[in-house]
């Protein structure tokens, strides 16, 4: 059997993520301890207790998702489960690179944290935003984007497209697309 490990991106976070693995596996506890030390942040409390608003912040959610993903990957390897292929979606690409041996966990975690800091900094200086449009075909989404002046930027699946642009125009696009869908 051929096995691939796929790692998630930002948006997959939720309060409580990784808790069962943390409770059940020493390896997950080690990964969390190392991450908390590297980041100088109580990642366990953030992931398991929230609050959700804090976990949802890019500066926190990216290292949290990376750490949980790496912890689960480490448990699977410890159990002797190996893969032939790794891949990730957006942020998950960093976990995939670490899993492929391109960089070690600590270096990847620092890089993820820096990525999050830069994204957070830009988001505070630019009045822009993003929104996921779910359930509408590409043609309808791109047509509405052209009318309003925003862009379709991530084609995650045939029926999930992320749009981006000025915050005011994103809200307008969401309203129009909601009416059309």
Image (cartoon, rainbow, N blue to C red):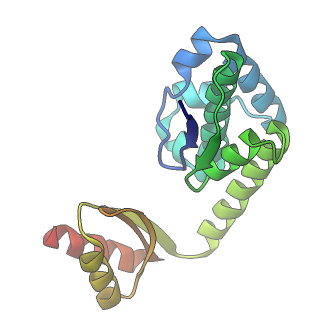
Q: Vertically, is 174 above or below 4?
A: below
Q: Vertically, is 13 above or below 146?
A: above
Q: Toward the viewer: 72 or 114?
A: 72
Give percent across and percent down for residue 111. 79, 51
Farthest residue toward the front?
1
For the point 37% across and 80% down, the residue is: 169
140 vs 85, left or right, is left
- Image quadrant containing the C terminus: bottom left
Give percent across and percent down for residue 175. 23, 71
Q: Vertically, is 165 above or below 34?
A: below
For the point 63% across and 38% down, the residue is: 64
The image quarter containing residue 73 is top right
Q: Toward the viewer: 130 or 20?
A: 20
For the point 56% across and 34% down, the residue is: 3
The image quarter containing residue 146 is bottom left
35 vs 60, left or right, is right
Give percent across and percent down for residue 55. 55, 40
Tally the marks: 0
5 vs 147, left or right, is right
Give percent across and percent down for residue 42. 70, 28
Q: Vertically, is 11 above or below 50?
A: below
The image quarter containing residue 77 is top right
């Amino acid at each position: 059997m051929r096995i691939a490990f796929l790692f998630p991106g930002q948006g997959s976070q939720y309060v409580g993520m990784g808790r069962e693995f943390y409770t059940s596996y020493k390896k997950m506890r080690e990964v969390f301890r190392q991450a908390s030390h590297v980041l100088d942040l109580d990642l366990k409390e953030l992931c398991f207790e929230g609050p959700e608003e804090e976990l949802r912040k890019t500066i926190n959610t990216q290292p949290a998702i990376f750490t949980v993903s790496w912890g689960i990957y480490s448990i699977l390897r410890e159990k002797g489960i190996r893969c032939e292929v790794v891949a990730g979606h957006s942020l998950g690409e960093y976990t995939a690179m670490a899993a492929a041996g391109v960089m070690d966990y600590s270096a990847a975690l620092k890089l993820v944290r820096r990525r999050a800091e830069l994204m957070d900094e830009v988001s505070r200086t630019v009045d822009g935003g993003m929104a996921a449009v779910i359930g509408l075909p590409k043609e309808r989404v791109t047509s509405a984007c052209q009318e309003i002046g925003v862009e379709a930027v991530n084609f995650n699946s045939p029926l999930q497209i992320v749009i981006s642009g000025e915050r005011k125009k994103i809200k307008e696009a969401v309203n129009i697309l909601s009416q059309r869908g």
